[in-house]
Image: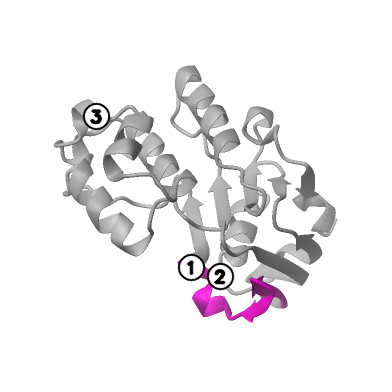
Amino acid sequence: MSLVITLDAQGLGRRYGRQWIFRRLSYDFRPGTATAILGPNGAGKSTLLSILAGQLLPTEGQVLYTLGGQALPPAAVPKHLAYCAPYLELPEDFTLLELLAFHTRLKPLRPGLTVAGLVDIMYLHKARHQAVRTFSSGMKQRLKLGMALYAAAPLLLLDEPTTNLDAQGAAWYQEHVARVRDAGRLVIVSSNVPAEYAFCEGQVQITDFQQG
């Protein structure tokens, strides 16, 4: 990537009502690394990922971002972020080619990759003129992953990336997440499935930051 991004989580906490989901969570996310956010279902992994993405404010603490060594305001983070999660919706009235034409105007693909090339990578060539609403759940997840993995973005966030994928689709994910791990790209994976984060060097156990 031409620019690298860093995230410095400082004393993060998130509360719903009187219940703290986690507190005093600090971690320094460095470019060129991959970190797994781990914990059981309902532990707050997706909440933490949304905070790191700048989509949700913490109840306490802050996340400091830099891009190319310069401070980056949270409002500018989405421009440099690629995000895949089961709860993110697709514009399903678009055909695949229409969706990709729209998406890539906002989030360009990695250098040298065309929309046609991405369609082939995702094994969706036969569905290129179909409305996305006709796709199976596995096809939709592969589409979400393909758009995130192959975006020209220095920050990649993946939440339960093999949701709705069969064994072949999960193998596809493992192959392609390995392909896109550039020296400067920062990758964060929220998961409780070891095969989804086996490549990660770092781990954040969210239960370590929960009150007993």
Q: CA distance from mark 2 to mark 3?
A: 34 Å
x 48%, y 26%: residue: 172
Amino acid on which disc 2 is placed: Gly
Residue linked to disc 2: 54
Residue linked to disc 1: 78
Among numbered discs 2 and 3, the one appearing first in the sequence:
2
Residue 9 magenta: no
Where residue 148 appears, as percent x and y from the top left, is 45, 48
Quick check: 40 left or right of 150? right
Q: Is residue 22 above or below residue 193?
A: below
Where residue 84 appears, as percent x and y from the top left, is 47, 48
Residue 41: image quadrant is top right
Structural crowding at the residue carrying mark 2, measured as other residues with C-alpha within 10 Å and reported as few (<14), some (14–19) or many (≥20)? some
Where residue 173 appears, as percent x and y from the top left, is 51, 31
Amino acid on which disc 1 is placed: Pro
Among numbered discs 1 and 3, the one appearing first in the sequence:
1
- Eye-nearest disc, 1 or 3: 3
Among numbered discs 1 and 2, the one appearing first in the sequence:
2
Which label sits on residue 10?
Answer: none
Residue linked to disc 3: 125
- Eye-nearest disc, 1 or 2: 1
